[in-house]
Amino acid sequence: MNKVISGAREAVQGIPDGATILMGGFGLCGIPENLIAALRDKGTKHLIVASNNAGVDDFGIGILLRSRQVKKMISTYVGENDTFERLCLSGELEVELVPQGTFAERLRAGGSGIPAFYTPTGVGTLVATGKEVREFDRRLYLLEKALRGDFAFVKAWRGDRLGNLVYRKTARNFNPLMAAAADTTIAEVEQLVEPGSLDPDTVITPGIYVDAIFQGTNYEKRIEQRTHRPKGGAGA
């Protein structure tokens, strides 16, 4: 039951070209930094990446976009990445934009064995193009399909060698949903501990969902846009 591997490089060795990968994170918070960098170094191509956002030009998923390793992005927000914009407008990158709540529910459905669901979000917009629309109680709903991946890259604060994961604050974001919605889930953690060290009440992702785990290193934890008040306070 020991699921510990040596590191990110070992974790990505079995990922083939064309794989669909779910990548946790919200902005640059809670992203699997080590796994993304290792995948860039490995050079795996034609990837389909599902993530809330596309990182920034030189960090997060942005480094995979710059190296032209991503064929398609499934995301909810992509406004911080100039590389993404250029690739999309040039036709080099296929993009599927999904409302954020729908994105979360598609992942939840994928991890729960639910093939599809109806939602009112997107009715009457471009999001509805090509999708079934039905009326329930005099309101229109779109049929949205579940979202699953061949692999999930998740980032947690602490984890044990059995794969049980604890997330910290906002870094929890989409990671638990993705951990349950992939054929193979790989977790990187800041602190790798022995079984029994984690308070069971704090475990969000049970080890049954995790196939491999390792302790990451050198986390940058960047901030997308650092803002502050003018010197002297708001009244200056």
Image (spheres, helix red, strand yellow):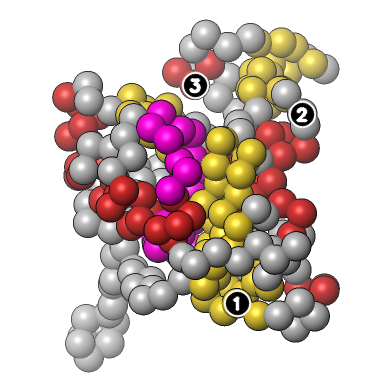
Q: Give residue 236's position: percent from left, percent from top.
A: 21, 86
Q: State the residue at coordinates (68%, 70%).
A: 161
Q: Earlier in the sequence, mark 3 or mark 2?
A: 2
Q: Residues within 10 Å of mark 1 (few under 14, many from 20)?
A: many
Residue that carries the numbered disc 3 in the rendered image: 127
Residue that carries the numbered disc 1 in the rendered image: 192
| Spatial separation of the CA atoms under disc 1 and disc 2 | 32 Å
Q: Is 181 situated above or below 57? A: above
Q: Which mark is residue 114?
A: 2
Q: State the residue at coordinates (65%, 11%).
A: 133
Q: Earlier in the sequence, mark 1 or mark 2?
A: 2
Inspect the image, locate mark 3, and give the three-letter code of the amino acid beneath it. Val
Q: Is 228 situated above or below 32? A: below
Inspect the image, locate mark 2, and give the three-letter code of the amino acid beneath it. Ile
Inspect the image, locate mark 1, and give the three-letter code of the amino acid beneath it. Leu
Q: Give residue 94's position: percent from left, percent from top.
A: 33, 25
Q: Which residue is at the far bottom?
A: 232
Q: Residues within 10 Å of mark 2 (few under 14, many from 20)?
A: some
Residue stretch in magenta = 13-35
Q: Nearer the viewer, mark 3 or mark 2?
A: 2
Q: Does residue 192 appear in this view?
A: yes
